[in-house]
Image (cartoon, rainbow, N blue to C red):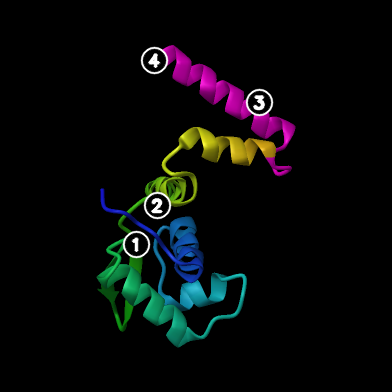
Amino acid sequence: MPKLHLTKCELEVMDVVWRKGRATVQDVVDSLKRPLAYTTVMTTLKILDEQRDVLRKKKQGRAYVYEPAVSREQISNSMAADLTQRLFGGSVKSFVLSLVEGDSMSQSDIEELKQAIESLEKEA
C-alpha cells in the first residue's frame, strides 16, 4: 500500500465521510466541527479523490456523492508508520514508549495495551 499522509483538513473531511459512509460537499460542510467554506471543502474532496485516491465519487443528480476508498485503519497505520520512521528512526518501541510515558493514557488504555501485547505474544 502506498504511503497515505493526509493534512489536518483532509483528515477532518475524511472523518465526516467515514462516519456517514457517503457524503456530498454540503453534507461535509454541515457536519464539520469548524466552519470551512463550501469551496474549500469541494477542493479538498476533489484532491482526496483525484490526487490522494482515498475517495470515490459518483454523480447523483447535480451533486457528487463521495465514498471512502480506504479505511480509517489504513490511513492511521500509514501515518503512524511514517511518524515512527521520521521521529523515531523506525523504532516502534520508542514510539510506543513515548506514548506510554506521556500523561495521555487512561487506566483503561493501559489495560487494552496489555491485552494487545498478550495477544501478540500468543501469536509469536
C-alpha span from label 1 to label 4: 37 Å
Residue labelled with disc 4? 124
Which amino acid is tagged 1? Glu
Mark 3 or 4: the one toward you: 4
Quadrant holding the C terminus: top left
Residue labelled with disc 3? 111
Which residue is pictured at 45% across the width and 20% down the height? Answer: 120
Please name the predominant secondary structure of the magenta segment in the image.
helix
Q: Are marks 4 and 2 in contact (CB under 8 Å)?
A: no
The earlier-in-sequence mark between 2 and 1 is 1
Which residue is pictured at 38% across the width and 49% down the height? Answer: 78
Mark 1 or 4: the one toward you: 4
Residue at the top extreme, as displayed:
122
Q: Quadrant location of residue 46?
A: bottom left
Q: Which residues are magenta?
A: 102-124
Q: Callout 4: few (<14), some (14-19), or many (20+) C-alpha neighbours within 10 Å?
A: few
Which residue is pictured at 45% across the width and 47% down the height? Answer: 80
Which amino acid is tagged 3? Glu
C-alpha span from label 2 to label 1: 15 Å
